Image (tube, grey):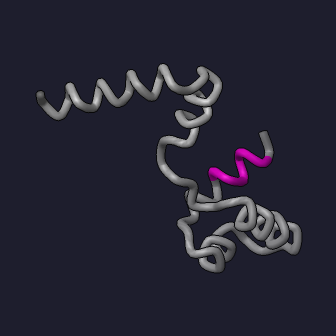
Amino acid sequence: MTAAEIARIGGVAKGKAHSKAQLRKWGKRGGRPEKLDRKGLATLKRLLATGTTQAECAAILGVSARTIGRAVARMRA
């Protein structure tokens, strides 16, 4: 049996053993991890409210200025 076949069997068994809602929940955790978690976003909001620039926020939080820009755009949307 190939590795792909073994993986498929495991996926089928998991699919039969769990509900569709549980499988969807597991699937939504996939993808790239976020650079800013809830605590980081709360800190960002506080820093921006005090007049800190996005570049300064990026340096404080240890992320890029683009990451801050994307987070600010999501906050405004």
Q: Position of residue 24 (x, y in %)?
A: 58, 28
- Magenta region includes residue 18: no
Q: Quadrant of the N terminus?
A: top left
Q: Position of residue 52 (x, y in %)?
A: 77, 74
The residue positioned 81% from the left and 64% from the top of the image is: 45
Q: Position of residue 61 (x, y in %)?
A: 64, 74
The boundaries of the magenta stretch are: 70-75
Q: Does residue 17 appear to the left or right of 54 in the view shown?
A: left
- Magenta region includes residue 73: yes
Q: Does residue 23 appear to the left or right of 15 in the view shown?
A: right
Determine the residue located farthest toward the bottom in the rendered image.
60
Whether 76 is drawn above or below 6: the answer is below
Q: Position of residue 73 (x, y in %)?
A: 71, 47
Whether 6 is drawn above or below 32: the answer is above
Q: How many marks?
A: 0
Name the one closer to the observer, 23 or 66. Answer: 23
The image quarter containing residue 2 is: top left
Name the one closer to the observer, 57 or 5. Answer: 5
Determine the residue located farthest toward the right in the rendered image.
49
Name the one closer to the observer, 27 or 59. Answer: 27
Q: Does residue 64 appear to the left or right of 7 in the view shown?
A: right
The residue positioned 64% from the left and 24% from the top of the image is: 21
In terms of secondary structure, what is the magenta stretch mainly?
helix
Name the one closer to the observer, 30 or 57. Answer: 30
The image quarter containing residue 29 is: top right
The residue positioned 80% from the left and 64% from the top of the image is: 42
The residue positioned 78% from the left and 39% from the top of the image is: 77
